[in-house]
Amino acid sequence: MSNPVLQSCRAAGRQSGKPKPFWSGCGHWILVRRCPNSSLIPLFSCLICLGVACSNAGAAAFTNILAIDFEPSEGYTQGLPLAGQNLWLSNDPTKSSGMQPLWAGLGLQGYVGLTPPTPGTNTVVQRHPVRYPVLFNPASEQTPCVSFSVLFRIEPSTQGTNDDFSWFFSTTSPYVYLFTLTFDHTDNRVYYETNGSDNRYSLGTQFTNSVLHRLQVDMNFTNNLWSASLNGRSITPGGVAIAPASQRFNYAYLYAGWLLSNSNAPGNNYMAFDHIRIVAGATPPTLPQPALLISKPNRSAAASVTVQTEPGLVHFLDTSDVLQDWQPFASTYATNFAWTVNDSSAATNRQGFHRGRASAGP
């Protein structure tokens, strides 16, 4: 069956070889009926279109502020330092950053680290190789709820010591660090700092080397609060103050940082990152239901359901016979952008429906 609406949905859900951010494109569930009479399929395709159109009716309005996938179509070049490409900046003369295809099937990624400075010559232990300007003012746009997310992976050193990596957030004028998230190799815990303080705190949330993680930071510039999670697990104890009560700041820069543990024995570890997204709205953006592509060759065949997934999120597939009383059918923690499930009950059931769900945690 060739359905131009579904084709346009699938096309809209991808950019530069990677799916668009989970909050844009055709991120909705698609209904497919198991019909004994194939002549009914074109008619039911109209119902599929209606399902897509109506599923967004209650969604909160939001604005896509930033989407970076580090692909050549965006102007990125493999093998060059990340600093200097597009709007990425750096005050680090060694430009310890780059662009390489470090994850199979996900194109190019940016990274910091990997090439250590000459031992004993680096006097700046805390380094911030790259930063990116976020040209957006939440207050003036009346969209105070800002969400940042990124996929990243930390690879340990094969020589030298293991170092720490971080994500920083700052204003531009006055120049103030809003908050910091540090991934500490001493105990593999994630620490947070806020309000420009040097005090570090941790809830005990840990990261794992060589594993894909999804970091999400939610900011509310009206309530003056921020929170963060790693694969859906809280890094901060609920909302934490962005600034003292007497001050209000905006969000202007994001940093990917490399913090040397020992300048006399710097490691060759690195943090690779991809799929950077920033969205904003009057209320916090929510995860819509993901798009599905369902194949059932004939009435006696099982249904093959492919879910458009977002790495770092938990995805669920539910089934129903009558569009209510949905039952969980399968779930997965996504490490790529597609997940295929076979539903053998479709070989005997006369009709049925599937829907996808996404969650930031189990």
Image (cartoon, grey):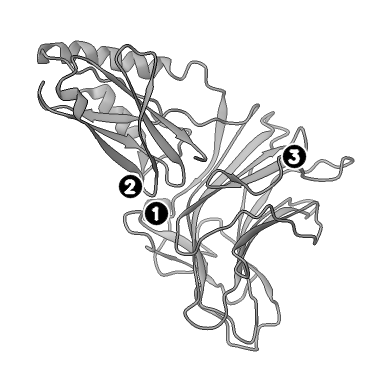
Q: Relative to 51, does residue 216 appear above or below in the rendering?
A: below
Label 3 sits on a secondary structure element that is strand
Residue marked by disc 3: 225
**Pointer 3: residues within 10 angstroms few (<14), some, or many (20+)?**
some
CA separation, marks 2 and 3?
35 Å
Q: Which of marks 2 and 3 is nearer the N terminus?
A: 2
User: Of the residues shown, which amino acid type is indicated by label 3?
Assistant: Leu
Horizontal side of residue 306 vs 226, given as left or right: left
On the image, numbered disc 2 is attached to which residue?
A: 17
Q: In this view, does 118 lie above or below 300?
A: below
* Residue ID for mark 1: 71
| Cα–Cα span, label 1 and label 2 | 8 Å
Q: How crowded is mark 1: few (under 14 residues within 10 Å), some or many (20 or more)?
A: many
Q: Quadrant of the N terminus?
A: top left
Query: Considering only order in the chain, which callout, 2 or 1, is on the residue closer to the N terminus?
Result: 2
Callouts 1 and 2 close, C-beta under 8 Å = yes
